Amino acid sequence: MKDDSCFRKGKTPRRPPPKKPPNNQKDPVGVYCRVRPLGAEDEECCIEVISSSTIQLHAPEGFKTNRNGEYKETQYSFKRVFGVSISQMELFEHVAQPLVDDLIHGKNGLLFTYGVTGSGKTFTMTGSPGQGGLLPRSLDMIFNSIGPYQAKRYVFKTDDKNGMEVQNEVDALLERQRRENNLPVPKTPSARQKLDPEIADMIKPEEAYKADGVDEDSSYSVFVSYIEIYNNYIYDLLEETQEDVIKPKPPQSRILREDQNHNMYVAGCMEVEVKSAEEAFQVFWKGQKKRKVANTCLNRESSRSHSVLIIKLAQAPLDADGDNVLQDKNQVTVSQLCLVDLAGSERTGRTGAEGTRIREAGNINQSLLNLRTCIEILRENQMCGSNRMVPYRDSKVTHLFKNYFDGEGKVKMVVCVNPKADDYEETLLVMRFAEMTQEVEVARPVDRPICGFTPGRRHRNQAFKEELHLVHNLPPLPSCELTDPHDDITLPRLIEALQHRYRIKQMMIDEYSQAANALKAMLQDMDGNLISKDNLIREQTGKLDEKDKVIQTNKAELERLEKRTKMQEHKIDILQKTTKIYEDDKRSMRQELETREQRLHRELSDKKRIEQRMHGVVSDTKLKWEKECVSYSSFNTDTSTPVRPLHRRSRSAGGEKWVDHKPSSSMDLGTVLQPVIPNSIQVSAPSEKALSKCDRYVLTHQEVASDGEIQTKLIKGEVIKTRGGGQSVQFTDIETLKQELTTVPGRKRKSSEGKPPNGDRADGAWTDVETRCSVAVEMRAGSNMGPGYEHHGITKRRKP
């Protein structure tokens, strides 16, 4: 059975990215702010420059009224703020000059202007006659720096894959002739085009800049390309199109591709080699006229597309002779600077756009929104450590410049703002985006490797050519033709000319000899110095070796001490942890001990208090009983045994008469049940007279029960006459009245509520008022219970 995978359409394998040297150094995106002057028709200003790096926004008065004063004054800080009085030259010096210097030294750069429509972005980038912007000044600085070191045209040649090829001067000459022959009109010096008056004199001579540290042993060539991104389509503004008045051909859009180094480029875009700043700006202005602009309510010439001018600088070292460019493609370094003029964000309600203008504004705002989204995700990934995918491909602007944000060069942004009150809301959004953008960091580009040839090759080659030019400029020989055998003029003249040339050559030989001797002496001195320096270096190397040994020994000792220190620190940590555990245990045990001691002291104090209380009760009870027993014995006037009379008074005849003995020490407990004895004589101490008049005796006795409550005992007895004529009391029973505190949470007020189903009385039923009032305690006669025992409760019958 055949494998179906061989019939599937295979995908092109992705090339691994080229290995780059690690670079952990990063620079934040440089964000600058420029405030344009307030228009003549605008009265209220909402922006104030506080310092060279801070601006403050004031909400307009009408805006505050409509929003109930919601917005307050806000301040925003940037790398630098340029006020209305700043010049184009000063702006270029702080913003674009470092990028041009990096371009000449082989590093990439990206500079774009950002802001609302009508904020001065195009003026900042392009400028006007006498006030050239960032773009013409950058071109002028490039050619001022590399002018003497430019290669001849077509020595560097671009390919279709974003690469650069190098060819010798013969092939370059043939290429020039071929292209000049293909031109419709031969290019002659007289046919050179004049500069457009709109771009003439953009830069004054005294405002020219020049880079420092340019490699004189390299050759340079500059290529420019100019594109626009309109409705998220890329168009080449330098494309040569045949103008057809009857049926004009629409421009062809371009696509983005990725080269072998994973850099994005516009495929099929025309790259023009230029040899001067005027020629480069003339090419730019030719494409600028094709750019999409329109008249809106906010801007008379509003840009409807994003424009990108790409400046490529190709450089390669000279050969060992310093005469021609080294024919090695791997030695060619290509750096580029992108100058981007972004279209301004706008609201269709304010611009009055209709039809095509609404579609253009929507695409402009969408591309700027995607730029903002990419910046936000980059910032989140860097600050939070996340790994979210950045949506570069959602817009052509971000897709084209993704390499710059991934570390292929420096990135700078100039935020242009209009201080008029009508733009306050849009300006507020621009400020927030700009302040967020400068928190994004971009990897710093690495320096290009240095060629191994001897420096100063170009200078030596020029000196050699000048000397050679002197040799070829010897006086010419006169005519040597002899027509007359008696001619005495020609030969002497020839001899004199030869002697003159000999003298000149002799002078040159002498000069060369002197120069050679001086050079030889200088070389000898240099050799002597080199030998002495070699000896010194050898001596210093020996000392360094000894120092290295000492350092290695010290390092080993340090490592040993560090290991020991770490071990001791580890032991200290363990001891500290153990100590902490012990201290926690000690603290908890101490707390537990203190708690137990407090409980013990409390129990001991309670015990002592109870003992003292019980001792007091026992002693009081014992004393009372002793007193009562003494009083009882005094009642018996006769020591003989009491006898019952044969005939007693009938109880029903007149009722029983009681002696109610209540000692003066008795306490009124305020209970509901009180012993009420009718037909009684109340006494505080018994007497014979009272006893002789009564038949019954009752003693009210109070004592402390085991639960700490006071209980009342009614000790009853019968009064019996003794044989000697006295009176005695025979105790028959004891009634106990006891008061208890209930712990039942809910008290029932009715006996009929809350009864168990089986008819048994619940614990809480004894606490009802009705039940308590119908229960009495009685000790029956002849009971074996002594004082202190409580009898079962018997419910009294209620009267009908």
Image (cartoon, rainbow, N blue to C red):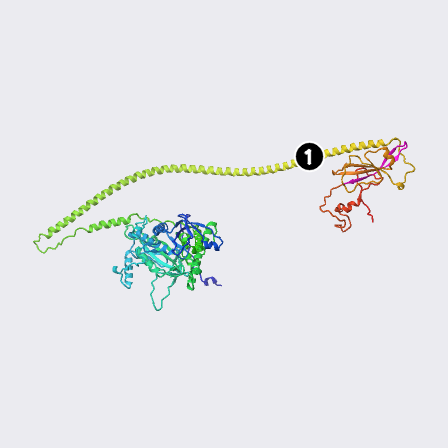
Q: Main secondary structure of the magenta part?
A: strand
Q: Position of residue 327 (x, y in %)?
A: 31, 54
Left/right placement of residue 54 relative to residue 178 reads right
Residue 583, percent from left and from top = 58, 37
Q: Secondary structure at mark 1?
A: helix
284 relative position to 421: left or right: left
What residue occupies the far bottom of the structure in this picture?
Answer: 246
Task: Tally the marks.
Answer: 1
**Pick the front one: 668 or 66:** 66
**For residue 439, above or below residue 188:** above
**Relative to residue 43, is residue 661 drawn left or right?**
right
Q: Position of residue 398 (x, y in %)?
A: 42, 56
Query: Which residue is more in the foreground, 118 or 260?
Result: 118
| Of 122 and 666, the residue lying toward us | 666
Q: Quadrant of residue 162?
A: bottom left
The three-letter amino acid code for the residue at tag 1 is Ser
Residue that badge 1 annotates: 605
Q: Residues within 10 Å of mark 1 (few under 14, many from 20)?
A: few
Residue 724 drawn in magenta: yes
Q: Magenta part of the protein: which range?
A: 718-738
- Can residue 131 be seen here? The reply is yes
Q: Quadrant of residue 630?
A: top right
Report x, y in % for residue 561: 47, 37
The single residue placed furthest to the right in the displayed view is 646
Residue at 14% in and 50% down:
497
The question of residue 351 being in magenta is answered with no
Residue 119 vertical placement versus 244 (above, below): above
Asked whether residue 389 is in view, the answer is no
